Amino acid sequence: MDSKSASPEKTCYSASELQEFKELILKKREEAVRNLQMLQAAVAGTENDGHETAPTLKPLEDGSSVLEKEQNQKLAVRQQKFIKDLDAALVRIENKTYGICRVTGKLIPKERLMIVPHATMTVEAKEQQHKH
């Protein structure tokens, strides 16, 4: 009767857990797409700003407008990468490989995936990678 004392370590998430992750990822993806659209609109909009301002302030506004546009472009690129990462996570869910660390093969803790749903490594594997 001692055989129950050492339960095998879980190696994958259940179908219901995968569905829960899928819903979380779809929600985050929808939000990321909205953010991307707003950033793209802001980048496009900065080209038309400032034409009613006094000529003496125009050079200052042009400089800040360029800086703001560059920042928005960088944020847009980050959003695009985030969306790609979420799409890749959705593929892993379909393939039933979601939540498995690509370095150790161990299950990534659910708590980590709820915060970083596109994670592909355990925290330990990521820390090891940064040491090298």
Image (cartoon, rainbow, N blue to C red):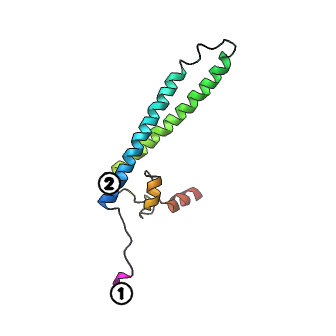
Counting from the top left corner in percent of width and height, residue 109 is at: 44, 62
Q: In this picture, is 118 found above or below 55?
A: below
Q: In this picture, is 3 found above or below 81?
A: below
Q: Which of the 4 image quarters holds residue 102?
A: bottom left
The image quadrant where one finds the C terminus is: bottom right
Secondary structure type for disc 1: helix
Counting from the top left corner in percent of width and height, residue 24 is at: 39, 50
* N-term mark: 1 or 2: 1
**Residue 109 is a magenta residue:** no
**Magenta region, residue range:** 1-7
Counting from the top left corner in percent of width and height, residue 37 is at: 44, 31
* Label of residue 99 in the image: none
What residue is disc 2 on?
19
Relative to 25, 132 lies left or right? right
Circle nearer the viewer, 1 or 2? 2
Q: Amino acid at mark 2?
A: Gln
- Is any atom of residue 132 visible in this view? no
Q: What is the count of numbered marks?
A: 2
Q: Which of the 4 image quarters holds residue 95?
A: bottom left
**Residue at image location 34% in from the left, 59% down from the top:** 17
What residue is disc 1 on?
2
Relative to 59, 39 lies left or right? left
**Residue at image location 37% in from the left, 77% down from the top:** 7
Q: Amino acid at mark 1?
A: Asp
Looking at this view, is 33 or 83 the one in front? 33
